[in-house]
Image (tube, grey):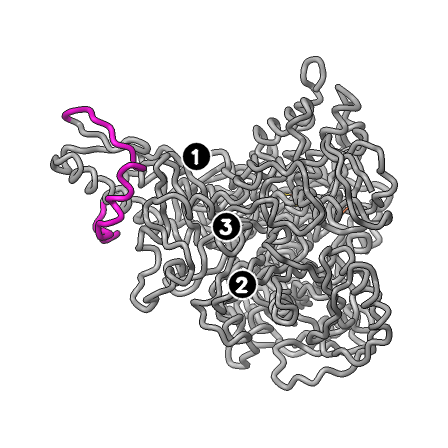
Amino acid sequence: MTNNKDNRPVTREDFPSGAPVNISRRRFLLASAGATAGALVLGFGLPIGPARAAQGSEQITPGTRVPAFLEIRPDNTIRLQSPFVEGGQGVFTAMAQIVGEELDADPESFVVEVAPAGSDYLLINNKIRITGGSNSVRSSYSTMRKLGASARLMLLQAAAGRLNVPIAQLKTEPGYVINTSSGEKVSYGSLAKDALDLSVPDGNSVELRDPSTFRWIGKPLKRLDILDKSTGKAIYSIDCTVEGMVQAAVQHAPRLGLDVGRILNEADVSAMKGVMSVHRLPGAVAVVAERWWNAKIAAEALQVEWVKRDDKDAKYRYMPDDFSSAAFSDRLANEESKGITAEEEGDVNSALSDAATVVEATYRNQFLHHGQLEPPSTLARFNEDGSLDIWMPNQAPEQFQSTIAKITGLEASQINIHSPMLGGFFGRHFLYPEANPFPQAIQLAKEVGRPVKVIWSREEEFLRDPLRPMAAVRFRGGLDADGMPVAIEAISATEGPTESLTGHNPDSLDPLALEGLTGKTYAIADRRIAQVYVKTPAMLAYWRSVGHSMNDFFYETFLDELADKGSQDPYELRLKLLKDNKRLTHLLKAVGELSGGWKRGPFTAEDGTTRARGVGMASPFGSETAAIAEVSMKNGQVIVHDIWEAIDPGSIVNPAIIEAQVKSAAALGLSQILMEEVIYEKGEPAARNYDLYPILRPDQMPNVHVRVVESGAKMGGVGEPGLPPVLPAVANAVSTLTGQRVREMPLRKLRLES
Amino acid sequence: MKLSINNEVHDVEADGDTPLLWVIRDNLGLTGTKYGCGLAQCGACSVMVDGVVTRSCVTPIDSVEGREITTIEAIENDPVGKRVVEKWVEYQVPQCGYCQSGQVMAATALLRETQNPTEDDVAAAMVNLCRCGTYNAIHAAVKDLAGEKGGA
Ligand code: FES
Ligand code: FES
C-alpha cells in the first residue's frame, strides 16, 4: 500500500532525512507487494487506477468484470482486489477461498488487497459497498463464486485457442489447464495475457462447482495475513509514507460546536523544535512538522480561546456544556410515553391485565467507545495533475470518495482511495461528521503544499469517537398461573445510530435502534416492542453488533427476571418457549451440551469457589447464537471463568475464522458488560485514554469454547453475532450467584455481594 | 545521539526526551512497532531493551543510549523470537494484528528470560491489551512454547 506517486516500490530514499539503515528491501517489497507487482508485471489486466475502474460506471454490473478483480501473474500467483476491507475478521482469506474454489486455484496462491473505489465493487444489493453489518461474505458469496468460475472459463478458452483443441478436451487442476488427451499442462499465469483479450462470460451461465466437491470452501484454512501480522510487516494507515510527506497533530475543541478564537501562544509554539507551521481548522488547531512527536507536543501546547462555532449547515451536533451522561440516562429512564410500535402481536394490554403476575422493570445501558487499537490517521497527497491520493482507515471507500469530492470540488475519478489494513474497526470507520481525520489532512496538504499525514493521539480520538447509543427500556411482563410468560412489552427510550446520522423521521423507525428487542422468536403470545425517540446530544455510531450490542442484554436478562418470578429454570424456560422452533432448540441444546450439560448453580467448583451459570440467546445479522457463562465473585468483582458459545450461521466458508470471530466478539461483549462506560460530564468525556477507560485485560479473559452449527439455513453473518448473547449470559449468572438482579451495565459500578 | 537498534548503530537526530517509539517509527521508518495509547497502557509499542520488554512510547531515547534495542523487524533473527512467530502462525493468533508486534515481543522476552515459565510467569508477562480479544490464542501459543522440550 505504501507507494509514492510513480507507483514504484518505496525505497529508503522515500523517507525523510534521518538516514535509515537496516530497513530491509524485502520488507518493503512485501509491504507494497500488491502495487509493485501490479505495476511491473503484465498480468491478467487489472485496471490499476481507481479512475479506470470507475470509468463507464453506469453500465457496470458490480462483481462481473473479471479484470477489475483478478490479476494472474506469470508466476501463477493471483492478485485479488477485495471489495471488503480487512480488519481482522478474515475476509481476505474468505474471498480467496471462494474465488479460488471456482477458479480452481489454491487460496494460498492469492495476494489480496482492498479494491479502489469504483462501481465494480458495489456488491451489496448491487448498490453500495460497506464492510459492516457482518455482510461481506454472505452478500458476495454467489457473486464471487461466479466471478471465479467466469475467470476459469476464460482461461480454458484461452488454452483452447493456444493448444488448438476443443474446450471439451480440457480440464483444470489448481493453477493449470490440462489437455486431457496429451496430458500437456499450461499454467494460468502463462495464459493470463490471452485470456485478457476475451470477453467475460455471463456469470449466470457459467457452471459452478458441486458443493460436495469443495476443497477450500467450508474448510478451516489458515489465514493469509497471519505471518505479516506476527512480524510487524502488515501496513496500516498510520504506517503509510510517501515521498516529501510531513506529519500533523491536532488539538480539538473540547466540545463540538466550538471554534478557534485567539491562539494565545502561537509565536512560542511556532518556535518549538521541529515545528513547521500552525494551522486553524474547523473546530481544531493543527501543527505540522517533519516528525509527528514534535507536532504532537506542539499541538498540545497551543493555548486556544475557543469560541462558538457558526456553522448553519452543521452535520454534527452542538455539545451542550452541561451534558452529563448520568443525567441523560436518568432522563431516558424517566420517559413515560408509550412510544411508536415497532413490533406487535395480539393485545399486550389485555394480556397483562389477565395475567396472574405482572413484572415491571427498567433496564439501562451505557455509552461506549470503539477503542480500536489503531488511532485514526489519514495521509493525503495532491498530485501534479490535480488528482488526490488518500490513505485512511475506512469501511466504505465510495462513500468517503463522494464526500471528498464534495469538499474538494474534484471529480470522484480524481480521488484515489487507498484502504490499508484496519487496526480494528468495530464500526469506527464509517463516515461520521467530525470524527474522521481526512478533511483535516486534505486541508493541511493544500495549505502546506506537501503530502500530509494526520494522526490523532489516543486522547484526541476519545474526544471525537462517536458513541454506541444509550437506551432505557421499560419492560412489563405477564405470567400465567403456572409461571409461564404470556405477555411482554418493551418500550425503549433511545436513538438509533442511523437516525442520528441521517436525521430522525417521525413516521418511521430506525430498525437498528431496537434490533434484539424486536426479532425475538420466543412463543410469547402477546407482545409489543416500541421506541420513544430521544435525541442524544452526543454523536452516535455503529458499534460491533449495533442494536444487538445492548438490546439482547435487556431482553434476555428481563426474561430471566420473568423466569425467576415464575419459578422456572431459565434454560428450561427457553426450551419451552422455543419448542416449535427446531433450529433454535437445536442450538440451545448444542450450547448446553458443549458446557457439559446445563447446570445453573450456585455450586462449589473444584477450587472451592462458589459459581453459577447463566444463559443468553440472540438472532443477529441472519445468524443464531447462544451462550452460557460461568462466574464467581472475588472482592465484589465478577470473575468470568468460561464461556460456551454456539453459533449457527446457516452455512459456512471457514470454520476456523468463525471460531476466532466468536471468541473475539465474546471478549468485546465481556469487556462491555464488565467494565466499559463512557462518562460525559460538563459536555466532555471524563476518560481520554485507556487508563480511565479500561478494556478487557488478558487476565480477565475466560476460556471461550465455540461450537459451529451448520444448519444449512441461509448464510448469516459472522463478525458480530458472537457478541450479543454473552452479555445476558454473564448478567444472568451474576444474578443467580448474588441473588441481585442486574438491570444495567457495566457490572463494575454495581455493588455486588456473593 | 547514537542508538543501537537491531544490531546496527544509528545516528539519530532527536531530543533526548523523545520517546523511543517515535524515533523508531519516524526517524528510522520501522513501522512494525505500533502506537496505541502513548501512556504505557496497551503495550502495542513493546520493544526489547537488552532483552527486557519495554514500552517504547514512554521510554526517552537518552535512557537507552548504549543499550541494545530489538524491534519486531528483527524478531526472526532471534532463535526464540523465530519460534514465537512460528507458534503465532500455528495458532493463528492475530486478528487485526495491530497489537501483535507487541505481543510477540512480550512472549519472546518472557521465553528468553525463563525457558519454562509457569502459569503465573505467563500471566505476569503477557499483559498487553488486545482489542480483538485474541487472548485465548495468545495463551495457547505461549503455553505451548513454555512446555517445549528444553525450553523455548
Ligand atoms: S503505545 Fe505504548 S503502551 Fe500503548
Ligand atoms: S489483534 Fe487486533 S488488537 Fe490485538
> Is ligand 2 closer than 8 angstroms to the Cβ of mark 1?
no
Q: Earlier in the sequence, mark 2 or mark 1?
A: 1
Query: Of the residues shown, which amino acid type is indicated by label 3?
Result: Leu
Within 10 Å of disc 1 (Cα), the crowding (few <14, some 14-19, many 20+) is: some
> For the residues tagged 2 and 1, is the chain the same?
yes
Q: Earlier in the sequence, mark 3 or mark 1?
A: 1
In three-dimensional space, the C-alpha distance between marks 2 and 1, rounded to whole angstroms, equals 42 Å
Secondary element under disc 3, as helix, strand or loop, is loop
In three-dimensional space, the C-alpha distance between marks 3 and 2, rounded to whole angstroms, equals 16 Å
2 vs 1, front mark: 1
Query: Of the residues shown, which amino acid type is indicated by label 1?
Result: Glu
The answer to whether residue B12 of the structure is visible from this angle is yes
Q: Nearer the viewer, residue A445 or A418?
A: A445
* Quadrant hosting residue A229: top right
Within 10 Å of disc 2 (Cα), the crowding (few <14, some 14-19, many 20+) is: many
The numbered mark at residue A518 is 2
Left or right of A465, for residue A1? left
Q: Earlier in the sequence, mark 3 or mark 2?
A: 2
3 vs 1, front mark: 1
Left or right of A510, for residue A368? right
Would you name the residue on which mark 3 appears? A578
The chain containing the residue under callout 1 comes to A
State which region is magenta. Answer: A181-206
Secondary element under disc 1, as helix, strand or loop, is helix
Q: Nearer the viewer, residue B71 or A521?
A: B71
Q: Position of residue A397 (x, y in %)?
A: 49, 61
Residue drawn 74% across the image and 35% down it: B5
Q: Position of residue A150 (x, y in %)?
A: 27, 47
Q: Position of residue A556 (x, y in %)?
A: 62, 54
Q: Position of residue A190 (x, y in %)?
A: 29, 36
The numbered mark at residue A108 is 1
